[in-house]
Image (cartoon, helix red, strand yellow):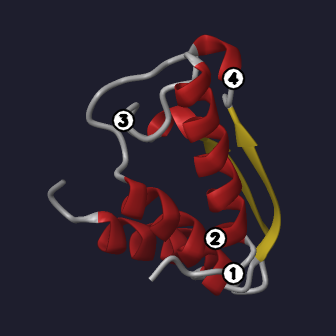
Amino acid sequence: DHYGIGAVMDKALQHLLGKNPNRPIHLSYDIDACDPIHAPATGTAVRGGLTYREAHFICECVSKSGALASAEIVEVNPTLSDTEGGAETVELGLGLLTSIMGKSII
């Protein structure tokens, strides 16, 4: 909250790529980091997680870095919610994948 997601991502990417801009990055995206209002079908849903925009911003930043080598989205489990919640979580996961691949939501 103090820095905002933009500054956090700048610091993280600087830490990872500052000395070696050609370093490959693997993104392991745990969807339960997102607020359960957006991703209810996960094993560890905790209120106050990432907003929809923050979730996508992280993926967009890593994609724009040019260093993304591989990625995975984990902890998506549609059986842990009702049908609507499962579909919402899967839809968010698919949207995050498109952001990882370079699509911007704005």
The residue indicated by pointer 3 is 37
Say which of marks 1 and 4 sits in front: 4
Up/down of 7 relative to 76, above or below? below
Q: Is residue 80 left or right of residue 51?
A: right
The residue indicated by pointer 1 is 102
Residue drawn where x is 40% and y is 31% of the image:
36
Mark 1 to mark 3: distance in Å?
A: 25 Å
Mark 4 Cα shell of 10 Å, populated few (<14), some (14-19), many (≥20)? some
Q: Identify the element where label 4 is drawn.
A: loop
The residue indicated by pointer 2 is 99
Where residue 58 appears, as percent x and y from the top left, is: 51, 65
Task: Kindly indicate whether the residue at mark 4 contacts the one at mark 3 (C-beta within 8 angstroms).
Answer: no
For the N terminus, the image quarter is bottom left
Q: Of 84 and 101, which appears nearest the observer?
A: 84
Up/down of 47 relative to 103, above or below? above
Q: Which kind of residue does numbered mark 2 sit on?
A: Ser
The residue indicated by pointer 4 is 77
Where residue 75 appears, as percent x and y from the top left, is: 67, 28
Q: Which kind of residue does numbered mark 1 sit on?
A: Gly
Q: Which kind of residue does numbered mark 4 sit on?
A: Asn
